[in-house]
C-alpha cells in the first residue's frame, strides 16, 4: 500500500503519539535529602492508607439523608391526690401530650389545676406586675393587661383599705393561683416506660428498611426487657428514670420544674460490610440546659384547658398548668458505600501533595547543601536561544 | 541608569524567576508502554468527563439543607355504626389527629370506644397478666398494676367461686374491653383525599420559593385532579387508597391494625438549568414494616379521651382507642449549582491520578522490557558527587 | 563484618533507595511563556489561599447535623365579640395550637364558630356543589356527599317551591355557614410575643450545648427586650407583628385568611475561633407563598371541635374553623473545625491543577514560538533503541 504525503504525516503523528515520554531524572547520592524525601513519601502514603482509608473510610460515598419513622408508646400509671382535683389515676392517654405517639412527646410529671373557670369579672393575679393598683384610676377601663389574663374593667380590688390590690379584669375567672411546685405530683413517672419503634431507610443506596427492634425468636423478650447499655443494648424499651440518669440528670429534680431530654438514635452503617453491621446506638442528653446559663432557661411547662358546658349551656373550663419532661427522639445516621469519586479525590490529592514534597527537597538540595552548584548545573539545563525566522511562525517570544 | 551590586542581583533574580522551566523528557519508541500509557490517560479523562462531570455533576456545589413547609388538608366523610357509639358521621375534624394540618398526620380507620368511664372501683381487665388473682391476698392494697389501669384496692373479683378473677382497682371504670378489630370501621377512609401543599427554598443559593402545586390557568384542575404517576404527576391531591397501593400495601389490611406510610417528596434541582427543571417527584413507602421482622412491629394505635362533667360536677370521660394510618410527608431535596471548588477538586485529583499512571508505566519500562538497561541509563542521569568546601555552606549532605 | 552476595545486593538496593531522584529541567529564556507560567501559578496559589482557605474555610471539616431543641412560649391576650360566641377573652391556652410549645405552632387570628351541633338531619351547605338539588330524586339515599358533611337521606330541602335547594343529610347539624372572614377577629394578635428557646449541639465535634438566650447578668433583660436586628439581635422574644413585617408581609392581611411564616435560626459556627463566635442569626420568610402562584395556595385554616354531653347523655359539639398563622422555627446550622483531610484535598487538587499549567505552557512553547524546534530537541531526548536479547527477559516491547 502506498502512502500519500498526508498519510505519511498522519502515520508519523500516530507513531509519535504512541511514543512513551517519561521525565528524565537526576540521581544524587545525597543521603540526607534522600532520606528526607522517602520519609515524606512514607508519611503521605501512611496518611492515605492509614488515616483516610482505614480510619475515615475515605473510599466511601456518604448518605446522611436518613429516612426515619418513629412510633412511641408510653406505659405506666400514676396516682395523684390534690385538694383541687381529688384522687386521680393517670394513664398515658392523660399524661402523654400529644397522645398520638410521635417522636416528640411530653410526659406530665406535675400539674396545677384551676377548675371551674368561667368568663366573668375577678381580680387579676397578683404576680402580674402591671395590674397592681391602689386606686381605681390605676386600672384603665378596656385596657388589655400585658402578660395578664384579661381586660381591665376599671375597678381596683383590694382586700382591705390599706393594702395594695390588683385591677379587676374580665376573663376566665378565678385566675390561676401563683404557686410553684415543690416536688412532682406524679411520683411514679420515674417508672413509666417508653417503647420506641424506629424504622430507617437510606434512599440513596436503596437500602432496605431496618428497625431498632431486635430480631428475636423469644416472644417475651420485648415484654420483659429494659434498655441497658451493657446487658440489653438493643432493647427498645426505656424506663424514664433510666433515661434521665443516663443524661446526667436527677429525675425528681427535672420532674419538679420540667425539662427536655433528647434520646439520640445513632445509626452508623457501613453498607460494604452488610446490614448486620448496621445497628442503633442510643445516647441521652439534656436538651434544655446550657453549660453557662442554667438559671434563665430552667423548666418547661405549658397550660391546656378542658371545656365543659353546664345544663344552661354556659361554658366553663378547667385550666391545667402542666410541668413535665419533653422527650425528643432524634434519629441521626449515615451510611457509607464504596464509590469511585471519593476514592479518586483522596488518592489524587494525596499524590499531588506527595509530588509537592519533591519541591521542598529540591529547595534543600539547591540552596542548603554543599554540592548545590553542581546540582544546579545538572538539574537545570539552560537552552541556548537561537532565533529562527520563518515567516509562518507566530513569534510571541 | 547605573546599577548597584544588589540591583544587579535583583535583576538577575527577576530574570531567572521569569525563565520558563520545563521537565526534560526521554522519548522511547516502545509502542507497548506507549499504548498502555495513552489508554490509562484516556480512561482517566473519560472518568473525569463522563462519570464525574456528566453523570455526577461534579462541578456543582450541593445544597441539601432544603427549607420546606408542608400544609396538609384531608377531605372526606365516613359513617360508622357501633353498639357503643351508635350511628356516627366522621369528618376530618374528628378522624385527623392532630387537626392542624401538619406534615405528620394520623387518619383514624378504626376505633374502640369505652364511653362513660368514671373514677371508681372495678375489676382490672383480664388481659393484664399481673392483675389476675384467685384470692384477695393476691391483690396487694395500694399496689400499682404494671401495664394496667389503676391501683389495687386489695380485693379479688371473681365471677364465680371456682374460676380465676382479676384484682379490683381504683381508676377509670369500667376498663376497656379486650377486643381486637377484625376489619376497619371507617370503610370509606380509602376514598379520603390528602391535599399536600409543599413550599421549598434553598437558602444557600438564595433560591426563590417554589411549590409542588402546578402552575395552571385551569382553576378547576385542583378540584378534579388526583395524583397519578403517569397522567397527573404534578397533582398534589392523593387518594388514601392509591397511596397505600403505591406503597405496596393493601388498604383494608393496614386500616384494620394501623400502620405508617411515608409520602416522600423528592426535589432534585439543577439550578444551572433553571427553576423549571426543579420539579417534585413522589414516592410512597411503608415506614413501619421491616423486611425481616413483620410480626413484632405490626400495627399502630393509641388512646385519647374526651372529658365531660355531669350536672353534679363529676367528671366522666369517653376513652377512644383509635387504629389508623399515620402519614408522614418527608421532603428531601438537593440543589446543585456550578462552583469553582468542586471543579478544581475533581479535575485536580483526576490529573494527579493520571500522573501516577506514568509511575506504573515507568515500572513496566524499567523492569519488564528488554531495553531496560538503556532506559535506565538515560532516564536516570547520575550526578557525580564533587564536594565543595566553602565556609559559609551548611553541609547537611 | 563480611557481606554475602545477597547482603551486597540488599545494601545496594537500600543505597539506591535512598538516592534522591529529581526531575531534570530545561530552562528557556522565553520571557513570554515564563510570565504566562508564573501568572498561572500565582492565580492558582491565590485561589487556594484566598478563595479556598480565607473565603470558604476549606481547611475545615463541616458538621451540618445540628442537634437542636426548640421550646416556644406565646404570651398575650385578645378579646373577641361575635354574635355566636359572645364576649370572649383568649389566652395562649386557647389560641396556640398545639399548646405544648413545640417548634411548629399555630396562632389563631380569626375563627368561625358553629356551636351546638348535634348528630341529626339537616340541609347540606349550599357551597357543596354536588349536594344541590331540585327534586328528591337528585339525592340518592345513603350516598356520601363528596367534600360534604354527611350521608344523604334522600330528601331535597328547598326554601320555596321554585328555588333550588340542597339534599338533606345525616351528620353534625346544623352545618357550618359559608362565610369568609373579612378581617381578623383577634385584632390584638399583632402584639402577641413568642419566646423562642433554642438549644443546640454539634455531636460530631462534641461541642457543648449552646442556647440562643443571651448570657446576661441583667435579670430584667428577658422581660423587657423585643428582638430587633440592630438594637437587640440576641433577644429571643419576638412580637408577631414584627415577624410578619420582617418577612415582608402585612400582619392584618395574613391574619385574615391565614398563612405560614418561617423563623429561621441560623448558626454559623467556626469552632476554631471559639464558642463566643457561634451566635444565632434570625431570618423571617413567608413559607406558603410562591412567587408565581399566589392565588391558589392562599390561606391556612383548619377545623377543630369541642365535645359536650347534655344531661341526657346526648353528645353535641362546638365546631370551630380557625384561621391563623403557623410559625415554624427552622434551625439550620453548621460548624467547621480544622481537619487534615479537607486540607490535603484542597491543597493537593490545587497543586495538581497548577501542574497542569506546565502542560499548556509547553504547548505554547513547542508549537507557537519561534524557537520551537530547538526546544523540542532539547526537551525530548529520543532514546536510540538497542535491543538486548537475554533469555530471562520478558520481551513485551
Image (tube, coloured by chain):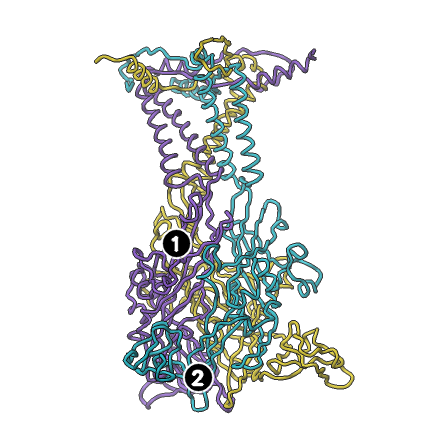
Chain colours: A yellow, B purple, C cyan
Mark 1, residue position:
B280
In terms of secondary structure, where does tag 1 sit?
strand
Q: Which mark is residue C316?
A: 2
B307 relative to A346, above or below: below
- Residue B318, quarter of the rendered image: bottom left
**Residue B140 seen in the figure:** no
Whole-percent x and y of residue A113? 57, 80
Give the left or right position of residue B15, taking residue A44 as reference.
right
For mark 2, name the chain.
Answer: C
Q: How many marks?
A: 2
Label 1 and label 2: CA atoms lie apart by: 43 Å
Whole-percent x and y of residue A383? 50, 11
Q: Residues within 10 Å of mark 1 (few under 14, many from 20)?
A: many
Q: Residue at x 56, y 19 (%)?
A: B18
Residues at marks 1 and 2 on the same chain = no
Q: Which is more toward the observer, B299 or C157?
A: C157
Whole-percent x and y of residue C223? 67, 66
Amino acid at each position: 500500500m502506498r502512502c500519500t504525503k498526508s498519510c505519511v504525516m498522519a502515520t508519523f503523528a500516530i507513531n509519535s503519539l504512541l511514543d512513551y515520554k517519561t521525565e528524565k531524572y537526576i540521581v544524587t547520592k545525597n543521603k540526607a535529602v534522600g532520606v528526607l524525601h522517602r520519609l515524606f513519601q512514607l508519611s503521605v502514603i501512611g496518611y492515605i492508607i492509614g488515616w483516610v482509608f482505614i480510619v475515615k473510610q475515605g473510599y466511601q460515598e456518604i448518605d446522611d439523608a436518613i429516612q426515619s419513622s418513629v412510633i412511641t408508646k408510653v406505659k405506666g400509671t400514676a396516682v395523684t391526690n390534690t385538694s383541687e382535683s381529688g384522687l386521680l389515676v393517670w394513664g398515658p392517654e392523660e399524661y402523654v401530650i400529644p397522645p398520638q405517639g410521635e417522636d416528640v412527646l411530653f410526659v406530665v410529671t406535675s400539674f396545677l389545676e384551676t377548675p371551674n373557670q368561667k368568663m366573668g369579672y375577678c381580680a387579676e393575679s397578683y404576680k402580674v406586675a402591671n395590674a397592681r393598683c391602689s386606686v381605681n384610676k390605676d386600672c384603665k377601663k378596656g385596657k388589655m393587661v400585658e402578660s395578664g389574663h384579661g381586660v381591665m374593667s376599671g375597678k381596683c380590688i383590694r382586700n382591705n383599705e390599706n393594702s395594695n390590690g390588683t385591677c379587676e379584669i374580665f376573663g376566665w375567672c378565678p385566675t390561676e393561683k401563683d404557686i410553684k411546685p415543690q416536688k412532682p405530683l406524679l411520683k411514679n413517672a420515674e417508672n413509666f416506660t417508653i417503647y420506641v419503634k424506629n424504622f430507617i431507610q437510606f434512599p440513596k443506596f436503596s437500602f432496605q428498611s431496618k428497625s431498632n427492634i431486635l430480631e428475636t425468636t423469644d416472644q417475651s423478650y420485648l415484654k420483659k426487657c429494659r434498655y441497658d447499655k451493657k446487658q440489653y443494648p438493643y432493647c427498645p424499651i426505656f424506663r424514664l428514670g433510666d433515661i434521665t440518669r443516663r443524661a446526667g440528670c436527677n429525675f425528681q429534680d427535672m420532674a419538679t420544674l420540667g425539662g427536655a431530654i433528647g434520646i439520640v438514635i445513632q445509626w452508623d452503617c457501613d453498607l460494604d460490610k452488610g446490614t448486620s453491621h448496621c445497628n442503633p446506638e442510643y445516647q441521652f442528653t439534656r436538651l434544655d440546659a446550657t453549660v453557662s446559663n442554667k438559671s434563665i432557661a430552667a423548666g418547661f411547662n405549658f397550660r391546656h384547658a378542658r371545656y365543659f358546658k353546664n345544663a344552661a349551656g354556659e361554658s366553663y373550663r378547667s385550666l391545667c398548668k402542666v410541668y413535665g419532661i419533653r422527650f425528643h427522639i432524634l434519629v441521626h445516621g449515615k451510611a457509607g458505600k464504596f464509590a469511585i469519586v471519593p476514592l479518586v479525590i483522596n488518592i489524587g490529592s494525596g499524590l499531588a501533595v506527595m509530588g509537592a514534597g519533591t519541591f521542598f527537597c529540591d529547595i534543600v538540595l539547591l540552596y542548603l547543601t554543599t554540592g548545590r552548584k553542581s546540582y544546579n548545573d545538572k538539574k537545570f539545563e539552560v537552552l541556548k536561544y537561537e532565533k529562527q525566522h520563518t515567516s509562518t511562525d507566530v513569534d510571541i517570544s
